Image: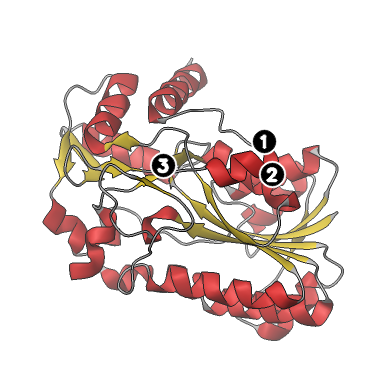
Amino acid sequence: MKIFVTGGTGVVGRPTVAGLLARGHEVRAAARSEQAVTSLRAAGAEPVDVDLFDPHSVRDAVVGADVVAHLATNVPPFPAMLKPEAWAMHNRLRTDATRNLVDAARVAGVPRFVKESITIVYDAGGPEWLDERSPVAAAGLMTPALEGEKIALELADVATVAVLRFGLFYGGVGNRGTDEALRLARWHLSMVAGKSWAFTTAVHADDAASGVVSSLGVPTGIYNVCDDEPLTRGRAIDAFAKAFGTGRLFRTPNWMMRLAGGAPGSALTASQRVSNRKLTALTGWTPTYRSQVEGWQAEARMREATRA
């Protein structure tokens, strides 16, 4: 298939492009910098100079595509992410860019559309498992994510639409978040916030990418792409600390994380134990790393081998 990808040079986009190419697909990917152009060409993909906020530019980019995979994000670095205004570009990619891509896909007759989203749209569930039928947050920090999902699903009258709710990304080549977490660890601090017993749902960047590739055959719907075993926040912090030998780490205070979304910022600290069973049952996809325990250990080994 001919696949147009946005975010193809990001922490999930890079392994997604590689996975698609490995399966024999033709990949064209958005590229707005020389570095991105060089990276995509080296991987074997065709770079496309496109402004995702320009409808005309987007229409030209998707012509001839069998699939549009919208994976572009712009997550601000820590601690800038604690400021609501720092998420403006990220939110525009989820809403305005999605609108342009959906409209362009409709005009071009693209038969399949894949849209990234995130599992923290769910309401708090305590220790209970959450799936795609579980209630989502009505307003607040996750509003742009849910709006983007709705925009994508508008296309379902003429195309197959897969909305992928990813767990929180960790690991992967070039993941700035890992570097930020290691810098905080020098002060025995963690980027993780919330009660130690509360569950957090994550996914290794490489597993997120393989989930995208697997989604190319699913029917229209929403799918969770996450670890088999979400950990409590206490266990997640311990898994990171053990893998990298940092010693004991302390959680980020809840009030700091709530600054990112005001009172509704509780999405960042809520207990969410999210199941991936729908995607695994339909496609056979399973993450390489069952949980952050195995994922962080692999990440630490990779970094150690790179330094050797």
Provide the secondary structure element on which disc 2 rests.
helix
Labels 1 and 2: the sequence-earlier one? 2
Q: Is residue 64 above or below residue 170?
A: below
Which image quadrant: the N terminus? bottom right
Labels 2 and 3: the sequence-earlier one? 3
Distance Cα–Cα, label 2 vs label 3: 18 Å
Residue at position x 19%, y 47% in the image: 194
Nearer to me, 196 or 131? 131
Residue at position x 38%, y 64% in the image: 136
Provide the secondary structure element on which disc 3 rests.
strand
Q: Which residue is under mark 2? A: 214
Quarter of the image for residue 86 reads bottom left
Residue 62 percent coordinates (x, y): 78, 71
Labels 3 and 1: the sequence-earlier one? 3
Q: Residues within 10 Å of mark 3 (few under 14, many from 20)?
A: many
Q: Which residue type carries mark 2?
A: Ser
Q: Is residue 15 shown to the viewer in this render?
A: no
Q: Is residue 96 above or below residue 160?
A: below
Provide the secondary structure element on which disc 1 rests.
loop
Contact flag, marks 1 and 2 (Cβ < 8 Å) = yes
Residue at position x 51%, y 43% in the image: 276
Q: Which residue type carries mark 1?
A: Gly
Q: Which residue is under mark 3? A: 202
Q: Is residue 284 shown to the viewer in this render?
A: yes
Distance Cα–Cα, label 1 vs label 2: 8 Å
Q: Residues within 10 Å of mark 1 (few under 14, many from 20)?
A: few
Residue 157 percent coordinates (x, y): 72, 77
Describe residue 113's horizontal placement relative to residue 251 as left or right: right
